[in-house]
Image (cartoon, helix red, strand yellow):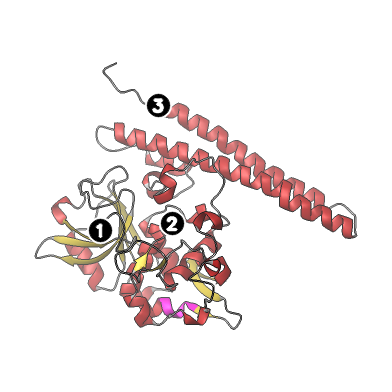
Amino acid sequence: MSEFLGADTDELLDMGQGIEQRAERLDDLATTLAATVTGVPWTGPDRDAFIDRFESTVRTALIEAGARLGNGARAIYQHAAQQDLASSADGSIDTARYAELLGGESWSDVINTVQDAWETANPFSDPLTIDDLGGRYVDSPEGRDFDPSSVDLSPEAIREQVMRQGAIGDCWFLSGLMAAAQTDPAFLSQNVTLREDGTWDVTLYEDGEPVVVNVSPDQLARDGARVDSDGNRNTWNGDAIGYMSIYEQAAINHLGPNYESVVADSPQAGLELITGAEAEGSTFLDGHPSIESLDTAIAEGRPVTVMTDPLMPFNSDLAAAHVYQVRSVDTAKNEVELVNPWGDGASKPHVVRVPMDMFYDNNITMTGVGAPKGEWG
């Protein structure tokens, strides 16, 4: 056979929709059963024990099975979208159809594939748990004596700390944090408060409205986002808990209930969740900002992030389907400086300079330009 034959994407989409419908049926069944069980006019310790057993076994099993099916359906949609994109002569597909199937409002939900550890995972596997992320930070050797008050949340610390993403594919959010930390670290500092009980209150934003999310040290995963504090060694042993660790868990708690809720989204979505102000977004289907526009945005105190090509960026120093911070623009050299949230010791360089004449040429497919810092919150 001399030609390559791919899957029929229409059949893939039909299969994905069938799986998604069954996932929704399991969720509905779990809700109906829970209402029936708790609504029985029965009191006493036997009732309490029965309900506890139902919640921990039957209802939990139904919800987890529904989540596995939902993840599988999403993976099928993504594979279909990627095949359509790769097979398209002009690099375009019906983005509206895929955005609707993926439950998103942007092209990123089509092309920002599940990254990092998710790239090779079985989409029908169990939902990610804290044990999959190295367990609780407070149970690790470096975290057993952890004192929440030891986390430096001053604007100076937030500005200087280097991000290490960790094992969760939430670069869209963490890169937004990096860009916000460069633009207005005081804003991030004032939006994280240590309570007397040793937990933190973090202010995020939903449709521009503030939402206060509580984060407990017990919720922090060992392999979550940390301060890259041990040079070029890509390990977590010497990395401290920082503002990014707390913010990441706040996003998980807010968007949850599962870790999968923060895996993959657009640069624009991350900036809006963090700042509460509407951000501008572009895709290769819409006009990208020029180098002068990017330079002006940074000068105006606007955080900027970009997402790379979902298949294979032309620049081998860039990770695919990954969101970077735009740290600076050199109009004289016609270059844009990108910072990788993976940190210093990862498989791809921490800082990459991309010539503008090749910036959108199979390298960058999406941009997110936040509002000026005076409009945040």
Q: Residue at x 37, y 64 (%)?
A: 164
Q: Looking at this view, is 344 or 194 the one in front?
A: 344
Q: Which residues are magenta?
A: 188-192
Determine the residue located farthest toward the top in the rendered image.
1
- Whole-number angstrom distance, CA of label 3 to CA of label 1: 35 Å
> Judging from the image, what secondary structure is the residue with disc 3 in?
loop
Q: Left or right: where does residue 61 sit relative to residue 158? A: right
Q: Left or right: where does residue 122 sit relative to residue 33? A: left
Image coords of residue 144 (percent x, y): 54, 72
Neighbour tally class for label 1: few under 14, some 14-19, many 20 plus, Cα within 10 Å: some
Q: Quadrant of residue 214 in the image?
A: bottom right
Residue identifier under label 3: 7
Image coords of residue 99 (percent x, y): 43, 44
Query: For the residue marked with disc 1, what is the amino acid?
Result: Pro
Marks 3 and 1, the one that precedes in the sequence: 3
Neighbour tally class for label 3: few under 14, some 14-19, many 20 plus, Cα within 10 Å: few
Is 256 included in the stretch rendered in magenta? no
Q: Which mark is residue 349?
A: 1
